[in-house]
Every structure is written in C-alpha cells, then in structure tokens.
Amino acid sequence: MSLLYTSTKTPIGTIHLMADEHVLLGANYTSYDSLLDTLEELDVQRGIDRVKRIPVISDLVDDYFDGDVEAINAIAVRQPGAHFSQAAWKAMRKIRAGKVLSYADLAQRAGSPAAVRAAGTACAKNAIVVVVPCHRVVKTGGALGNYAYGLDAKEWLLRHEGVL
C-alpha cells in the first residue's frame, strides 16, 4: 500500500503530513520534498498518493489546532533515528500539553543525563513536528531556545497549549 500525503493550513503555516495508513511518518512546515528526505528508503519505494485528507490523522491535527490540544496524543508515529533520538522522541511524547521540559531534563528522561547537546540535536532532527512536541522543550531557566520553524511558531504553539 502506498503512503499518504496531504497538506493543510494551520495558524502558523501550511503543515505537510506523510502517513502509512494510521501511522504518521512525517510532519513539517517546510515542503513535500523535505518530508521525503526524512523517510526510510523502503517507505519511499512504496509510492506516495496525494490525498485531500489522511483518515483519522487529519482530523486529529485539525482538532489540535481548533483547541483540543490533547488530540494529537492519539496519533501513532514512526521515524528513523539513532537509539538516543528514539528515546528522546518517546520522552517528548510524554510531555503533556501545557507543560515544558528543559533540554537537560529531556536528556535524563531519554536515559543519558549528560547528553544535553544530543537532546537538542534530537529536537532539531525531529521529523514529526507538533505531534512529537519538540516545541515543548526549552532551555534551563525557561528561555524558549531554538525551533526549526522560528521562535514565533514555537511561541504560538506554547501559547495555544497554555504555557505562555
């Protein structure tokens, strides 16, 4: 079965989504091509169908932006990455909406307290934005830190979730 691709407008830009049925493989605010770059080669070889909406996933993403900030928790995800990145992404999924975690705390929850820089790298390499909520990771002391799509987008997401 082919992968499914769609894009939809959100308050912070157009989000591009790629899924294997009900498993989200990629989500970004950049482009279709950049989504392809994050997929495993075996997935790309299956082919990709552009669709108006991805069943279940599109609805849950819409629900999130419409105010149900917990809706995205129901989306299954899969992305390639090293062991520490996998652990960091899993830890990010456990950060509840309305909460933030420091890069140091993320490193600890991912199993390597000294790997603070690696925690930042895992955030930067996260190919499933919003759903794997790297925007909920901030600097020690509360400064927002970086975000691939700009601090305005990170600020909007955190305000939407009630952090700011």
Image (tube, helix red, strand yellow):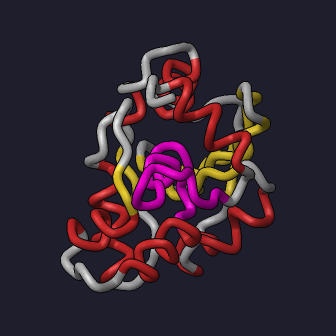
Residue at left offset 39%, top offset 65%: 103
Question: With respect to residue 1, does 79 lie above or below?
Answer: below
Q: Is residue 62 left or right of residue 90?
A: right
- Position of residue 68 relative to residue 19, above or below, is above
Q: Is residue 127 visible?
A: yes
Give whichever of 40, 127 is nearer the camera. Answer: 127
Q: Which residues are magenta?
A: 126-147
| Side of 84 where 18 appears, left or right | right
Residue at the farthest front position: 141
The image shows residue 156 at horizontal and vertical percentages of 64, 32
Q: Position of residue 123 (x, y in %)?
A: 50, 66
What residue lies at 75% left-to-right and 66% top-to-bottom?
34
Q: Is residue 102 above or below residue 108?
A: above
- Residue 57 on the magenta segment: no
Q: Please, what is the dominant secondary structure of the magenta stretch?
A: loop
Of residues 62 and 36, the one drawn nearer to the viewer in this rendering: 62
Count of picture labels: 0
Q: Residue at x 32, y 50 (%)?
A: 93
Q: Residue at x 72, y 53 (%)?
A: 149
Please tell me which residue lies in front, 47 or 41.
41
Is residue 108 shown above or below 15? Answer: below
Q: In screen coordinates, is 137 left or right of 18?
A: left
Based on the displayed image, in which of its 4 quarters is residue 32 positioned?
bottom right
